Image (cartoon, rainbow, N blue to C red):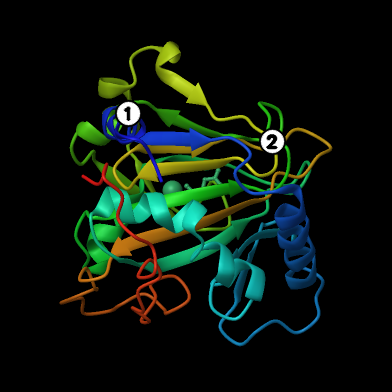
Amino acid sequence: MWTQQQLDQYQRDGYLIQRGIITPDEVAAMLEASHELMSGRPTPSDVHTVHETSGAIRTVFCVHRQVDVFRAACRSEKIAGPVKQVFGQDGYIFHSKINVKESFEGTVWLWHQDYGYWGYDGVDERMMSAMVMLDKTTLHNGCIMMLSGSHKWGALDHLDDEKSTSYKQWCITPEALRAHLTDESMIVPITGEPGDVCFFDCNLVHGSGHNMSPQPRKTMIYAYATVDNIPRGVEAPRPDWVVSREYEPVTADIQLGPAAA
Ligand code: SIN
Ligand code: MN
């Protein structure tokens, strides 16, 4: 459970890092499961893999249902507890993904707000993510970068980028970036060790660079929505592997602490 101070920090900055809350044994089990999913052997039916233009694996989506270790982690007190505190109610998994960012081949995630796209999926802004570092995460292997406090900037203009990477990305326009990201000191690199977890708001501006290092940078990201926040009114919904149609609460067993918002 977070203290009131941690909750205040999360609300102020739009993110909060908790170091080492996933144990080395738990990280080892997650890495083993990741390697199995990436091995080319058959995966559970709802898992969906996206490759880089180079052929390397970029992302493995929807691992929170049928892969035991990832299913357990998103329901654990350590991860789902703070989510429930922030929400003040139960959450469900909107989607999950392992961002692999292989050595030398893992490419950028341009600056974006997650809700910049999720809004079009028919959900409201009561959403957040928990990112578990599975490998050591450095400036060289493409750590995620945050703009602290940017979740309070409102919805920035986004555009479809289909050229920079293999994965069509909804990213902030250069004009909007120039207007808001006015000094490099605003960029906070989130480096860390396996087992560190970064929680962040769906409107926080974030992105990451190419992996220039010989080390991969695997992270597990769970995106949560409040349990009543299900996609509505979308004519052409995205597939279930990226916008889940399963709304089972994953935080129901976790008690709300006194610091709940
Ligand atoms: C994301 O924004 O979804 C991914 C960012 C990253 O893995 O660096
Ligand atoms: Mn994102």
Q: Secondary structure at mark 2?
A: loop
Residue found at x 15% / y 77%: 233
Residue 2: which quarter of the image? top left
Relative to residue 246, is residue 12 drawn left or right?
A: left
Dot 2, how many residues are within 10 Å of its Cα: few (below 14), some (14-19), or many (20+)?
some
Residue found at x 65% / y 37%: 210
Q: Residue furthest front?
A: 258
The amino acid pointed to by label 1 is: Gln
Quadrant of the rendering where the C terminus is positioned: top left
Badge 2 is on which residue? Answer: 193
Label 2–label 1 contact, CB within 8 A: no
Mark 2 or mark 1, whichever is nearer to me:
1
Q: Position of residue 150 (x, y in %)?
A: 29, 30
Badge 1 is on which residue? Answer: 5
CA distance for labels 2 and 1: 23 Å
- Does the beta carbon at disc 1 come under 8 Å from ligand 2? no
The amino acid pointed to by label 2 is: Glu
